[in-house]
Image (cartoon, rainbow, N blue to C red):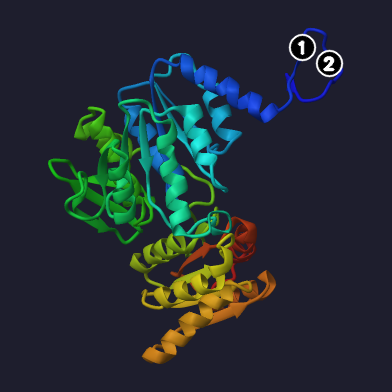
């Protein structure tokens, strides 16, 4: 046991180590374990898609190697060291997720993990209260370079010119992935099925059917695909890994009640992830309507109101039949959608609700069999509560045809 103040151990056989700072001690222990590790390490960071990309990369590598990966989203100054300490002795690869809420954290995590390969999924508006602006986010995510092993390399989103320019200037080897031709790995063909799942193929590769709902899962898959190719795996091994099931709580999690498809994506939200989730909903096919339930996006700094309104303008262009907004910031999005609809002469249901009770009442009036409904908001909103309030009521038979 490691403690920062004296304690009386109940069991005399229990070893107790007293240190000035337990968190620093944890990080130092993890760094020592990492230095003794003879395999390869992958670090995964970025604004969105870290956990999914980590799971996909782990699944791909597992087709040939013994892989240890960060459990869940253990990706911070405590979670990453614990992930390293939990690695089994037979592990040949570690796949470690790295996240940050404040400047300097990715650098610390990278120096502990010392990755041979680093993946940067994307750069977007997240935690702007800490980073100030998009340039601050870019600086933080690219600080994964601080701990990269000599001769190490990066896999980066080549569709982001600022990210590409920054990495090119570092002198570190890198490969790119993205939707655009010209990236090292890009889809020569892709499609979104009616159930929201993506199918794609890259040059010389077989068709891959991803198990996850969400068009944005394609970008995550391309990142993992690029890694697989760079470490010498075959296209078939990569396909097998990418088609393995991935379960992630509150991330595009599907439930069905009374002929209504409920999708819960309540783990977190920022303008990019909110738009991409709504875009996925708009591309899905079904007999009923596509309904978006959105809430506040937190930690966006001084530009929060502006970012919510800008998101509303973008969402207004999507094929959504109804929008229900919850919360003070969420209703900024719905008002922008309503204004854009009026300007274009479009008629759809756009509902504002400051409380879950009002949103629940409106949704139970609105929903009918065949509908697809997506719930999305920042973690602090606890949108899963509204999800369960509506779903449990629908389970009792309250739907309309």
Q: Is residue 319 left or right of residue 391?
A: left
- The residue closer to the viewer here, 170 or 221, is 170
Percent x, y of residue 139: 44, 48
Q: Secondary structure at mark 1?
A: loop
Percent x, y of residue 220: 35, 47
Percent x, y of residue 237: 25, 31
Q: Are marks 1 and 2 in contact (CB under 8 Å)?
A: yes
Q: Which residue is mark 1?
A: 14
Q: Is residue 245 left or right of residue 153?
A: right
Instruction: For residue 212, say whether it is visible.
Output: yes
Kindly report the distance in space between the C-alpha atoms of the residues bearing marks 1 and 2: 7 Å
- Is disc 2 surrounded by few (<14), some (14 to 19) or many (20+) residues within 10 Å? few
Establish if 291 lies above or below 256.
below
Q: Quadrant of residue 224?
A: top left
Q: Residue at x 53, y 34 (%)?
A: 108
Establish if 262 lies above or below 287.
above
Q: Residue at x 70, y 27 (%)?
A: 22
- The residue closer to the viewer here, 37 or 283, is 37
Count of labels in the image: 2
Percent x, y of residue 313: 42, 77
Q: Secondary structure at mark 2?
A: loop
Q: Which residue is mark 2?
A: 9
| Quadrant in which the N terminus is drawn | top right
> Which mark is first along the chain, 2 or 1?
2
Establish if 65 lies above or below 215.
above
Instruction: For residue 401, say whether it is visible.
Output: no
The single residue placed furthest to the left in the displayed view is: 204
The single residue placed furthest to the top in the displayed view is: 13
Establish if 97 lies above or below 35.
below
Q: Residue at x 23, y 50 (%)?
A: 200
**Tag of residue 245:** none
- Is disc 1 surrounded by few (<14), some (14 to 19) or many (20+) residues within 10 Å? few
């Amino acid at each position: 046991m490691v403690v920062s103040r004296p304690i009386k151990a109940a069991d005399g056989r229990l070893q107790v180590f007293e240190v000035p700072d337990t968190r620093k001690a944890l990080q130092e222990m993890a760094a020592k374990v990492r230095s003794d590790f003879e395999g390869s390490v992958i670090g995964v960071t970025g604004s969105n898609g870290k956990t999914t990309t980590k799971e996909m990369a782990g699944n791909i590598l597992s087709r040939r190697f013994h892989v240890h990966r960060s459990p869940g989203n253990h990706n911070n100054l405590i979670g990453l060291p614990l992930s390293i300490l939990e690695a089994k002795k037979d592990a040949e690869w570690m796949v470690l997720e790295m996240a940050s809420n404040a400047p300097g954290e990715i650098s610390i995590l990278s120096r502990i993990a010392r990755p041979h390969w680093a993946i940067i999924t994307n750069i977007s508006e997240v935690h702007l209260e800490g980073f100030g602006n998009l340039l601050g986010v870019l600086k933080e995510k690219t600080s994964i370079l601080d701990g990269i092993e000599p001769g190490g390399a990066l896999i980066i989103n080549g569709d982001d010119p600022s990210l590409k320019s920054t990495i090119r200037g570092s002198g570190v080897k890198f490969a790119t992935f993205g939707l655009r031709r010209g990236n090292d790995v890009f889809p020569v063909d892709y499609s979104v099925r009616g159930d929201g799942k993506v199918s794609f193929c890259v040059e010389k590769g077989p068709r891959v059917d991803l198990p996850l709902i969400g068009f944005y899962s394609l970008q995550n898959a391309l990142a993992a695909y690029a890694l697989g190719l760079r470490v010498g795996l075959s296209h078939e091994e990569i396909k097998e890994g990418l088609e393995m099931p991935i379960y992630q709580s509150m991330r595009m999690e599907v439930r069905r009640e009374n002929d209504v498809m409920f999708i819960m994506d309540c783990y977190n939200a920022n303008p990019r992830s909110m738009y991409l989730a709504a875009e996925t909903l708009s591309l899905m096919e079904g007999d009923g309507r596509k309904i978006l339930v959105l809430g506040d996006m937190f930690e966006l700094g001084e530009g929060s109101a502006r970012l919510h309104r800008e998101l509303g303008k973008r969402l207004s262009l999507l094929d959504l039949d109804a929008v229900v907004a919850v919360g003070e910031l969420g209703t900024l999005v719905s008002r922008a959608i309503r204004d854009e609809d009026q300007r274009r002469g479009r008629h759809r249901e756009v509902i504002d609700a400051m409380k879950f009770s009002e949103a629940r009442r409106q949704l139970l009036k609105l929903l009918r069999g065949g509908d697809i409904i997506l719930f999305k908001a920042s973690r602090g909103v606890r949108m899963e509560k509204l999800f369960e309030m509506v779903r449990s009521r629908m389970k009792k038979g309250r739907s309309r045809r």
